[in-house]
Image (cartoon, grey):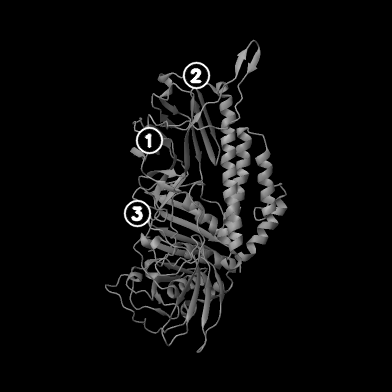
Amino acid sequence: MLRSQNEPKLKWEHYMQCDGSPDPSVPQEINTFMSLWQESKNDDIEFVIEKGNQVLNLIEKLDFLLLDTPPNELMEDTIVQYQESILALQCLLHQKYNEATEHLLKKANTYADSDSGNMEVVIKDKNVTFCIWANLKKNPRYSTKVTLFQMKNGFDLPKTVATTDVAVRILHTHYDHVSPLRHIPTLHLKVETPESKPELTVFYDMKEEEEEKEGEQKCGEDSYLVIEKEFVHVAPLQVATDEKEEEIFDENVVDLHQFTPVGGVYHIDALKLPPQAKQIKGWTMVELLDVGLETYPYPPASEETEDSTYPCIGVTLRLLDSVIFFEEPVVARWDSAGEQWRTDGISDMKYKMKEKQISFEMDAFYTIALIQDAHLHMPYQSWELRPNGTDELLFTVVTAFAEVQMQIKGNQCMLSSITVEGCEQLSHLTGRWTSPIDLTVALKRAGVNIFPSDYSHKYVCVNKKTPLAEVTAYEQLALVASAFAFSWSKWNLASGQDQVVFKVSEHLKTEAVKDEDWSLYMFSGQRAQRLKISETSEAFSDDLEENTEFHSTLVHMIKDFASEEAIEKVKKASCLFIDAVYQLLIATRVLTYS
C-alpha cells in the first residue's frame, strides 16, 4: 500500500524536526505534553496563542492519520485512542484560552480606551481572534452599543446590563472544535454480477476524504475478483452499517449530514469582571478571588424573573476573507446539553454579502456558527482531466457557483484557481502543493465542498451507478491519465446504472482539447467499448463504433487507438501520480455527481 507507508514517514519527519513537540500517535508523549501545559502558570495571551498553534498542529496530525491510514491497518482501539487525544487537546486548548482571558480581565483598567474609558482589546492570530470588552465606566452611553472597529465585530447590550461589572468576549476560533467528531464506520458491500460473469466483492469504508485501491486478483473462468476499497463513497447504495442512523425531527436542529459550519466558531460570552487593582498611598491593591473565569448570567436565572422577558443581545460579525459563502448563511447556536446546533433563539438576521458582514439578535449569550448547505456545488455541471506534462495534469470541476481547478503533479496536488462570477477567490489556498487529503480538507473548510459524503445521495439528485462500473472506471482513468484527457458526457445520464460514459482524447500537448478530438467511450467495469454516437447526437445509442471491438478493460480499449508515444508515457507514469489522480477522482465522484 502506498499510503500505508505514510505513518513511518511522518514519524521520521517528526524525529528529524527535533523541536521538542510530542508524537501525537504515542499516548505517553501526548499525555506528558498535556500534563506539563496543564500545570503551567503562564497565562500570557501571546504565549497561550503560540502554544495553541502547536496544539492545533498535533490535532491536524491525528486527523490526518485517521483519514489517511488504510482501514485494514486502523484498529478500533487506535481510532478510540486518537479521537480521545483529539478531544483532550481541544478541551485543554479552550481551558487555556479561558485562563488567558481571565488574566487579561484582571488588569482590564490598563487597556482602557481613551474615549469610552472601557477596555477594548483585539488580538488576532492566524487561527484565533480575541475581541474582549470590559465595562469599566458603567456608563450606559458607552456600554450599550459597542463596535470593535479593528475587526468590525460588535454587540448591543441591554441597558439592564450596561451598569454592571460585565465583560463580553467574542472568541472566534477559525476552526470548529465544537461539532461532534466524525464517525469512522467500516461498511461492507457485496455486488453480484450476472450469472455468466465472475463475482465481485468490494469492501468499503465510508470516509469522506479519499479512497485507495489495496489489491486486485486476476479473475478466470471459475475464479472470482476481489477489489478492496478503502474510502469509496457508495452513498446511493443500500449498505449495512454498525451505527444506527438517527433521524432528526426537530426543525430547529441542524442536520450536519446536510449542512456544515463554515468560517469557524464564535464563542460569544458574557463574563463577570474580576476586581481591578487600585492605587492606595503608593500601594497597588487587588482583591484575589480563586473562582476562575465566571460567566455573567443573562438572562438572570431566578424564581422571580423566570417568566420575565428580557431584551435580546444584538451582534454584528465580520466574516473571514478565507471562506466563501455562496448563499446567505444560517446562524446557529450550540446546544451543549443536546450536543447539536440549533437555530431557535436567533432572530432578526441581516446579511450583507459585499461587506461580508452578518448581524442578528439572540435571547442569551451563545456559541455561534454560520451554517451552509454542504451540497451547494452538487451535482456538478461538468468535469475534465487534462494532462499537461510528465506525471502532471489539470483536474477541473465546474459547479453552479464556481469553477475549481486542481493541479496534480507526482503524489502532490494544489489548488490552481477558484473562479466565482469571473473573479478568482481564495488566493491564500492557491499555489500550495499538498497531499490530496489536505487539499480536500482545506477546500471544505473554505466553503467549497465538491466531495460527497456518506449521506450526500439523500440531498442531491444522483446519477446512480454500480460500484463495479464507477470505481473500476476511476482506476482505469487514473492509469492512463498521464497521456489521455477525459471529460464529462451528457450521455452518462442515459447509459443506465451499469454503464458509465465519458469523453476521451489522446493529449500530449498542454493546450485545451478541441471538440472534434473527443471520442465517446462506455465502460461497465468488465467491458469497454467505443461508441458510434458523438456528444452532439440526437439520441443515445450503445452501438459500437465501426472497425472497433470490445475489450475487458479501458486500458486495452484505448491502446487500440493510441500512439506509441502515448503508450510509452502511460507505461512510465509514476505509481504515486496514478494514486493521487485516483484519490481525487474517488473523492469527487464525478461519474455519479455530475
The structure residue drawn at horizontal position 39% and vertical position 84%, both measured from the top left corner, is: 547
Judge the density around disc 1: few (<14), some (14-19), many (≥20) Cα neighbours within 10 Å. some
Mark closer to the chain start, 2 or 3: 2
Does residue 103 appear anywhere in the picture? yes
Up-down relation of residue 29 to residue 561 (above or below): above
Q: Between marks 3 and 1, how big is the CA–CA gap?
A: 23 Å
The structure residue drawn at horizontal position 41% and vertical position 62%, both measured from the top left corner, is: 383
**Callout 2, which amino acid?**
Gly
Question: Between residues 289 and 139, which one lies in front from this camera angle?
Answer: 289
Mark closer to the chain start, 1 or 2: 2
> Which quadrant of the figure contains the C terminus?
bottom left
Question: Between residues 288 and 386, which one lies in front from this camera angle?
Answer: 288
Up-down relation of residue 104 to residue 51 (above or below): above
Which residue carries the number 1 mark?
A: 363
Residue 193 in the image: state x and y as whole percent. 43, 81
User: Does 16 sit left or right of 554 as displayed?
Assistant: right
Does residue 561 appear anywhere in the picture? no
Residue 487 in the image: state x and y as whole percent. 41, 66
**Callout 1, which amino acid?**
Asp
**Callout 3, which amino acid?**
Phe
Where residue 185 is drawn, which disc sits there? none
Q: Between marks 2 and 3, how big is the CA–CA gap?
A: 49 Å
Residue 480 in the image: state x and y as whole percent. 51, 72
Which residue carries the number 2 mark?
A: 117
